[in-house]
Each structure stands twice: as structure tokens, then as C-alpha cells.
Amino acid sequence: DLRRRLNLKRRDEFGELAATFDQMLARLEAAFKQQARFTADASHELRTPLTIINLEINQALTQASTPEEYQQALEQIQVENEQMAAIVNSLLLLARADAGQIALQQEEVDLSDIALASVERLLPLAQRKDITISTGELPELIVQGDPHHLGSMLTNLIENAIKYTSGIGKHVHVELAREGERAVARVRDDGPGIASDHLPFLFDRFYRVDKARTQKGTEEPGGTGLGLAIAQWIVQTHHGEIRVHSTIGSGSLFEVYLPLQPEGAAKPELTCDNK
Ligand code: ADP
């Protein structure tokens, strides 16, 4: 309403002022809408596991009689509980990130250490799915940043590569390279790939290509759709860039570019504001 009353046709200072004010209001409006959608999505995502837990409890109370039946109900409740915990933890992190409340460490971090630790952590998961992981070149590349957050970002990309790839003989490849003033980490898989119409939304909060993944009955652990949003936040706070290249049928490649620590240069400030 307020925006409609602004006289944007005037060509004097008032017109200019009105135009600036109009742009500010449009940004505010967009921010409010985004916040409202985030809250609605969060509530919806939490309601699914809550509904399933409720159903399982009711069923156990009214129909279960053998220890096996109780055991089965408890196991299902545990899965949903873990899913809720994952959502809540990710939501808390994003909320604190939005509010600029996350104190990031500023250390010299060798990306090759981070990459090796992430791969080692995920080897058991890959083995369970009969997927091989290989590392290409892992040269020492020093960036300025938070080792914990950089580690969880890379772990998330490798975990996704394993999680969304299935079939014997499938392969995930991790490598590091120096490109001018930047380090680049690449995580490649030969999984199903992602259709191009999904790619622009992949880093959005709660965006999942396969919406059915969190439904009851699937064998895969349900995703939250928040992992890549968090990964993007981590990369951006480190003044970097995250990209995805993917086509259906020929796997996916996630690339993370981070500024290399210039030799002997002053430490750059990490930004906590991602807007
Ligand atoms: P999730 O918790 O669902 O894994 P993410 O934000 O990490 O959430 O990923 C968002 C979506 O992107 C996933 O649900 C999946 O559909 C898709 N995706 C991410 N990584 C890959 C990959 N390596 N191969 C195929 N699809 C992927």
C-alpha cells in the first residue's frame, strides 16, 4: 500500500527519494516473505516426524503385544527423533548465522588436512553402500578460516555424493587444486545427476529434488534439505563461492572456491552477515 502511494514519476529530488524508498520497501517486503516462508517450511518439516512418532506410539499402545512389535515401534521412533534433531540443529545454526551470532575461528587452515579428514570419516558410509572414494591431488592449500565449519561443509558435500549415489561400482572423487589466487575443492560423483531445472534452487533452504526421501518406509536416511544452504553460508562467510554442475545420468560435480591466504598478508575479516 505504502509503495503504491509513492510518487515515482517525479523527476526531482523527491522523485529520487521516492525511488530509493521504494527499493528499500521492496527489499524489506522480500525479506519478510522469505522469513515467513522459512518459518512455514520449518514447521512443516518438523510436523512430519512428529506425526509419525505420534502414530507409532498410538499403534504400540493399542496394537503391539510382543517385544518384537514394541522394538519395531521404538526403532521407528528413534529414526524420526534423529531426523527432528538434525532439523533442529540445522535450523539453530542458520538462525544464529542470520543473526550474525556465530563466532568463526580465524586460523590458517590447510585444506588438504580438511579433505583427508572428511574422506576418512565417510569411508565406512561409502563401504556400506559399496561405493569407492578416491582422492586426486591434495596439495597443501592454506586458507584463512574456521576448520570446524570448513570441515563440516566438505563432509556434507562428500556425504551427499555418497548418499545420492547407489549401485555397485559407483565412485566418488575428491580433489584440490590451486587456481590463481584461489583454492578449489571438487567433489564428483557418478550418481543419478540433477535435472537442470532444479539447479537454481539447490542451495535454498529445505529444497530437495526428491521430496519423498523423508517419507516413512524409505531405506535412505531422510534429508533435511538444509545441508547445502548451510554449506553455502559457510563458503560465503569465507569469501568463497560454491557451484554445482550436473546433468541427469552423468553425475554431479560440486566445486568450492576459497581465497588462498596471501603470503605474509594481513588476515581478512570473516563476515558473519550473509545478506
Ligand atoms: P539433504 O538433507 O536433502 O541432503 P541438501 O541441502 O544437502 O539436503 O541437498 C539438497 C538436495 O540436493 C538433496 O535433497 C538432493 O535432492 C540434491 N543433491 C545434493 N547433492 C546431490 C548429489 N551429489 N547428487 C544428486 N543429488 C544431490
Image: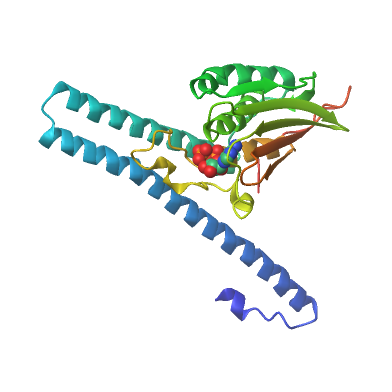
The answer to whether residue 97 is visible is: no
**Which of 268/239 is in front?**
239
Q: Is residue 219 left or right of residue 187?
A: left
Rendering coords of residue 228 (x, y %): 59, 40
In the depicted structure, whether residue 248 falls above or below residue 266: below
User: On the rendered image, what quadrant is the N terminus found in?
Assistant: bottom right
Rendering coords of residue 202 (x, y %): 59, 47
Q: Quadrant of ligand 1?
A: top right
Occupied quadrant, residue 268: top right
Occupied quadrant, residue 25: bottom right
Q: Residue at x 49, y 21 (%)?
A: 128
Q: Residue at x 58, y 26 (%)?
A: 169
Q: How many marks?
A: 0
Occupied quadrant, residue 153: top right
Q: Residue at x 80, y 19 (%)?
A: 139
Q: Residue at x 11, y 36 (%)?
A: 62
**Which of 103/41 is in front?**
41
In the depicted structure, whether residue 232 falls above or below residue 44: above
Rendering coords of residue 192 (x, y %): 58, 40
Rendering coords of residue 121 (x, y %): 57, 18
Q: Is residue 71 left or right of residue 104?
A: left
